[in-house]
Amino acid sequence: MKKKMKERILNEALYMKETKETVREIAKYYHVSKSTVHKDLKERLGLIDKTLEQEIKLILLNHKEERHLRGGESTRKKYLLQN
């Protein structure tokens, strides 16, 4: 794995650990696709740092459990803005 790629993966993971941002928000912040961030955090991070990978897995699991709430809130805001 290239040095630049390792740095990106670690930066994404540390940013998620500190801010608890979603994959989508991290992708915007680092100007990469959601797919890239997701693959970095789910597959590639384990090759670099196992401990950090476990912490990120917990955050991603939490996001997955909350996603129906986030979607509902987005829909509510959308309709409030239309009125």
Image (cartoon, rainbow, N blue to C red):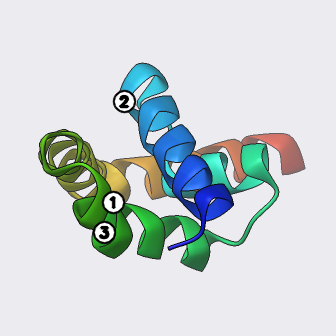
Looking at the rendered image, the quarter that the C terminus falls into is top right
Which residue appears at 45% of the width and 48% of the height?
70
Task: Locate residue 54, reporting x and y percent.
Answer: 12, 47
Residue 50, given in percent of the width and then of the height, sits at 14, 51
Q: Say which residue appears at 33% left-offset and 60% top-offset.
A: 45
Q: Position of residue 66 (x, y in %)?
A: 28, 48
Marks 2 and 1: in contact by CB < 8 Å? Answer: no
**Gap between marks 1 and 2, in whole Å?**
13 Å
**Lateral position of residue 9 relative to residue 41, left or right:** right
Residue type beneath disc 1? Leu
Q: Earlier in the sequence, mark 1 or mark 2?
A: 2
Q: In the displayed structure, would residue 43 be above or below residue 12? A: below
Residue neighbourhood size for the residue with mark 1, other residues' Cα within 10 Å, grouped as few (<14), some (14–19), many (≥20): many
Q: Earlier in the sequence, mark 2 or mark 3?
A: 2
Q: Residues within 10 Å of mark 3 (few under 14, many from 20)?
A: some
Which label number is shown at residue 23? Answer: none
In front: label 3 or label 1: 1
Report the residue marked by disc 2. Answer: 17
Secondary structure state at the residue bearing disc 2 = helix
Is 62 left, or right, of 72 in this rendering? left
At mark 3, the secondary structure is: helix
- Image mark for residue 42: 3
Q: Nearer the viewer, residue 20 or 70?
A: 20
Residue at coordinates 36% horizontally, 70% vertically from top-left? Answer: 44
Find the residue positioned furthest to the right. Answer: 82
Which image quadrant is residue 5 in? bottom right
Q: Is residue 83 visible?
A: no
Do labels 3 and 1 touch, CB within 8 Å? yes
Residue at the disc numbered 1: 45
Q: Position of residue 67 (x, y in %)?
A: 35, 56
Q: Amino acid at mark 2?
A: Lys
